[in-house]
Amino acid sequence: MSQTREPPPHRRILQQNKNHLPHDIVLNILARLPVKSVLRFRDDPTNADPIYLWNPSIRKVKRLPDSIYSLTHFDRVSTELAYQSETNDYKVVNIYQMPGPNHRWFEVEAEVYTLSSNSWRKIGISLTNNIVVSPFTNKTSTFVSGALHWLGYISEAAFPYMILSFDVNNDKFGEIALPDGQQLLPQGLMADPNSLMVFKGKLAFITLGYRHISGVINYEYSDFVISHRNSCFIWVMREYGVHESWSKLFFVKFENINYVHFLGCTSLGELLVIKNGVYPKFNAERRRKVIVSLDLETLHEKDLGFQNAPHIANSFMESLVLLDGATELSG
C-alpha cells in the first residue's frame, strides 16, 4: 500500500505562501504603478478594507489591525486621523451608520484606534439627537482645539444641521450648534454650500448664498437672494465651545462662476477655492476650472496653477512617528 510522503518543512512553507505576497512588497509594487492602472483594479469599499498610516517624511507605512466592525453590515462613512497632544499619541476614528428601525433614521457607531496600544475599541455616541453624518460623507473632518469636527444632520428636526465633534483626549462625542440663522442649507449654488475649516487656529464655518425663506412672496427679497447666490460668508468661533462667540468675519462675492468648492484655509488664513468659471467658448487661454488662494483681508486672488483639482487639502507637519515598527517604502 503506497503512502503519501509529507513534503519537507521548507517546501510546505513555499506551498502555503505561493499565493501570498508580504504587504511591503505589495506596497512597493503599487507605488511604482501609474495611478490610472491602480484605479482600474479598485473594488467598491467595504468595512474589511485595510487602513494604513503613512508618514511621507520618512516614507514609512503601517497597516492597522482589522476593524472591530469589519464583518458587520455597517457602512463606514468616515475615517479620520487625529493627534493627541496630552500623550503625544495618534488616533484613528471610524464612524459607521446603518438604517434604524423602519429606516426612519440611522444608527451611528464609532471605534477608535490608538497607535501606542496598536488596538481598536468601540466608542459610544451618547447624544440627545439621532445624528447622521451623511449627506456630508464626501467631506473630511476638521481638527481644531483637540477635537475632530464633521458637519452632521439631525433626523426629524426643524433645524437639522449641526456640527458633530469628537474630543481626542477623552474620547467623547458632542454637538455644536451652527451660527444663528445658518441652520438650513442656503439656496443658489448647491455644490458644497456649507463647509467646516480652520481659520488661524479657530473653528470656522463657511456658507454660500442666502437662504430663501419658503412661502415668502417678495420680489425685492427674491432679487436680493439671487444677486447674492455666489456670495460666501465665513463665521469663526472666537472661543471654542461658546455658541455666542460665533462671529461673521468675512463676506466674499464671486463673479462669473457657476461652481465653487472650498478646500480650507492655509496657516496664514488664505482661503483655498476651486472655481468653475463662466467664460466665452472662444477664450481658450483661460481654464474653466481654477484653484486659487484668496486673501480674505485684501480679496487678492492667486492662481495656484494646478492642472487637476484635488478632492481634499489638509495641513501637514513633519514627524518621526512610525520610525520604528513600520514598513519602509523604496523607490
Image (tube, rainbow, N blue to C red):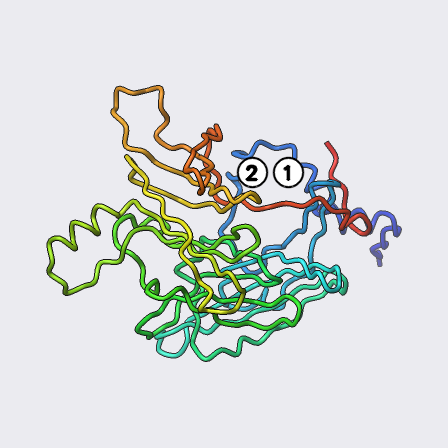
Q: Secondary structure at mark 2?
A: helix
User: CB atoms at circles 2 and 1 under 8 Å apart?
Assistant: yes
Return the x and y of residue 117 as percentages of the image width and height: 76, 65
Label 1, residues with CA under 10 Å away: few <14, some 14-19, many ≥20: few
162, above or below 255, in the image: below
Distance, label 2 to label 1, CA atoms, is 7 Å
Quick check: 294 left or right of 79? left
**If the image is split into quadrants, where does the N terminus sit?**
bottom right
Q: Is residue 199 above or below residue 110?
A: above
Question: Which residue is pictured at 30% across the width and 73% down the height?
Answer: 158
Q: Whole-percent x and y of residue 137?
A: 45, 57
Look at the picture and state if 300 lies above or below 128: above
In front of the other: 182 or 220: 220
On screen, residue 160 versus residue 80, left or right, reads left
Q: Quadrant of residue 136?
A: bottom left
- Residue toward you, 191 or 235: 235
In front of the other: 201 or 113: 201
At x 53% / y 64%, what residue is drawn? 239
Q: Which mark is residue 199?
A: none
Q: Position of residue 7 (x, y in %)?
A: 85, 51
Residue 261: image location, x then y, percent: 40, 44
Q: Quadrant of residue 316?
A: top right
Disc 1 designates what residue? Answer: 30
Q: Secondary structure at mark 1?
A: helix
Residue drawn at 76 percent across, 46 percent down: 327
Q: How many marks?
A: 2
Give the crowd class for mark 2: few <14, some 14-19, many >=20 residues within 10 Å.
few
Disc marking residue 38: 2
Residue type at mark 2: give it: Val
Residue occupying image coordinates x 43% and y 40%:
273
- Tell me if residue 89 comes above or below residue 10 in the rendering: below
The amino acid on which the numbered mark 1 sits, given as a three-letter code, is: Leu
